[in-house]
Each structure stands twice: as C-alpha cells, then as structure tokens.
Image (spheres, rainbow, N blue to C red):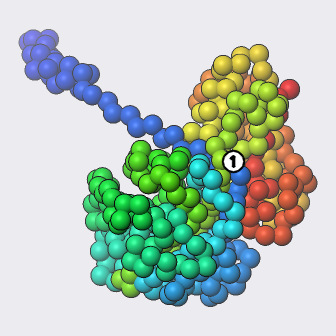
Amino acid sequence: MKLRTALLQLALCLPFLMHAQNENKITSKFDFIPGEKVIFYDDFSNENIGDFPVQWNTNSSGEIVTLSNYPGRWFQMTGGGFYIPEAKDKFTDNFTIEFDLYSTNTYNTPYLYNTNFIFVSGTLSNPNEGGAIPGKAGTSVTPGYETIDWSNWAESAEGYKDNGNVAYGFKAEEKYHVAFWVQKQRIRMYANDKKVLDLPRGLIEGYVYNIFRFQTTDEITLFIANFRIAAGLPDMRNKLITEGKLVSYGIQFDVNSDKIKPESFATIKEIAQVLKDNPTVKIKIIGHTDSDGDDASNMDLSKRRAASVKAELSNTWSIDAARLETDGKGESAPLAPNDSGINKAKNRRVEFIKL
C-alpha cells in the first residue's frame, strides 16, 4: 500500500519536475573592463569633511561627508544643479567611468529619480553652453521610478535625436557601484554586477565627448564615492604574452581587504582566457598598494590580494595553480608619487608578469 501511494505521488509530481528541468535559464554577460589609463580619480580623502572638492565644479552646493553604513568619504550633492569633474585629459574614443552611488530624496520615495548622468561634447570653462541641453552634443541617462530613460542631441541634429528606456530602478538609500563603458558611439551602463543599458548608437557621431556631468534637482540628495575615469581599452593578450607584463586596474578589492569585488569578474575572466589560450605560459601575480597606512600592513595586504587573485583563477576558471606564482610589493614600487588621489589610484594595481 505504501509503495502504491509513493508511486502515485511520483506520477503526480513528474510533470512539474520535467517542467522545472526544461525551464529556460537566462544568463547575463557582465563584460565591463575598466580603461587602461587612469585620467581622473577622486576618493575625496585629501580634503576636509565639510569642504567642496577642489577637482569639481558646480552651480549649486555640496560637501564631503561620511556615511555611517558605508566606509570612506562621500561627495554629497546637496542642491539642484550640475556637478562636473574637471578632467583635463581627453577621454579618447574608448573610456570608462565608475563611481559608488547612494541617494536620498525629500519625499522618501523608494527610487532614485530626477537625476541625469550626461556625456557632453562641450567646454569645461563654459558649463552652461547650450543651456538646457548642454554642449554641442550630448547623451543623458536618467534613472526613474522603474525605468532608465535616455536621450541624445546634437547641433547637427538641430536638437534632440533619439530616445528610449529600459526597465530598471535604482532604489533610494541603497549603495550601488555604477559604471559606464563608452566605445565610440556605444554606451553600456552597469549597476553592481548587472548590465542595465546597452546603446549601440547612444552617442551621436562626429563629436568629441570630454565632459561627464551629474544633474540633480532640489528634491534629490546624491552621494558619490571613488569616482574614476580611465581611457583606452586594455590589450591584455598583447601586454601579457608579447610584452610579458600586464598592469591591471580592473581587479578591485574591498577597503583594506583581500576580498575581490564582483565588478572584477570580467577582467579576471579575460586574463583566464589568455592563460587558457596559452597553456604553457606561467605568470607571477604581484599586488601593489598606495602609501596610505604603514609599510608592514601594506606589504601583507598586497601579498594577500595577489593570493586571492591566484585562488580565483584556479578555483573559478580552472587555471592550474602550478602555473601561478604570487608576490606583493606593498607601497615599495610606485608608478607615480603618492601625492594625489589620481596618483594613488595608479599605484593601487595588480601586475601579471610572464615567467
């Protein structure tokens, strides 16, 4: 009797089990790789709490603050207006922009809204050029309640040209790592480890886009941290196999930790693929830090970070651990003087040396 009951239960469940096995599985490719050359960086650590950061411009107000739930210093954009990082170097045709994002609003709305992330072809000395649609050309990406809207414009188009939206909402009072990857006209946007927007013709051709602009309203208080612009797509295969050395800024760690951040996924994946395509190559992974903190702690941290990268390559991507050596140099081998935020960002890196 018990056997008959069990068989009956199995027969009833079988269609559901078969449906579960046949159900479609959706995977999303997180392919973000930071640019090779850091051309602007600000973690707001070199200035006093309460000050407006000297590398930025605005027609409103803001100050450097701390948040009790998240480490580091944050740039609080207090009032409605524009906020522009004054990056002097050219972005080039291929560049990436990254920052940590947190927001609140006056009406306790659960989503970020009334905020624009804008790519502009214009003049740093004249931020109001073009008025409501700034610059000679531009593309605005606007988070809303449950969508991200976008539009672009140019003098050649005599105003607005294209627009659209995708389903995604940035929740208020939650931290995000936001990244943009521009390749000529193409704009990709990422939130944490998810690609949320991909526009093959997002930028109108024929213009040099050299300004990134935050635009807010009085209803929104925006906080950003660890803002970085980097230019040029890294050629990992050529650097590692032909030149014998790859300097990577795409592998990020938690503060004072050897825990690898999720946004490092694509960079490590690309390095793993190079190693799989060249199975006889052995490498040494070397961690480097800036000069913040004491020498001994930085040395230990750099060694642990190199070991974490080795473990990720071996455990996740099945690279033979015997092909991977590790070391750490701490702050002892800087690429630039540790005298500014951008130079410290250049010194925090992971190097791969072909043996």
- Pick the residue in front: 244 or 127: 127
Q: Is residue 19 left or right of residue 308?
A: left
Is there any visible trace of residue 200 in the rendered image?
A: yes
Q: Looking at the image, is 297 positioned above or below residue 114? A: above
Residue pictured at 41% horizontal, 52% vertical? 202
- Pick the residue in front: 154 or 188: 154
Residue pictured at 42% horizontal, 79% vertical? 131
Within 10 Å of the Cα at label 1, are there few (<14), some (14-19), or many (20+) other Cα atoms?
many
Image quarter of the C terminus: top right
Which percent across, then down, holds residue 232? 65, 47
Q: Is residue 228 left or right of residue 244?
A: left
- What element does badge 1 sit on? loop
Residue pictured at 51% horizontal, 74% vertical? 223
Is there any visible trace of residue 190 in the rendered image?
A: no
Q: Is residue 137 left or right of residue 22?
A: right
Which percent across, then down, holds residue 240? 76, 31
Image quarter of the N terminus: top left
Q: Looking at the image, is 41 positioned above or below residue 242? A: below
Q: Looking at the image, is 178 positioned above or below residue 71? A: above
Residue pictured at 29% horizontal, 55% vertical? 164
Reading the image, the residue beneath label 1 is: 36
Q: Is residue 298 left or right of residue 14?
A: right
Q: Amino acid at mark 1?
A: Glu
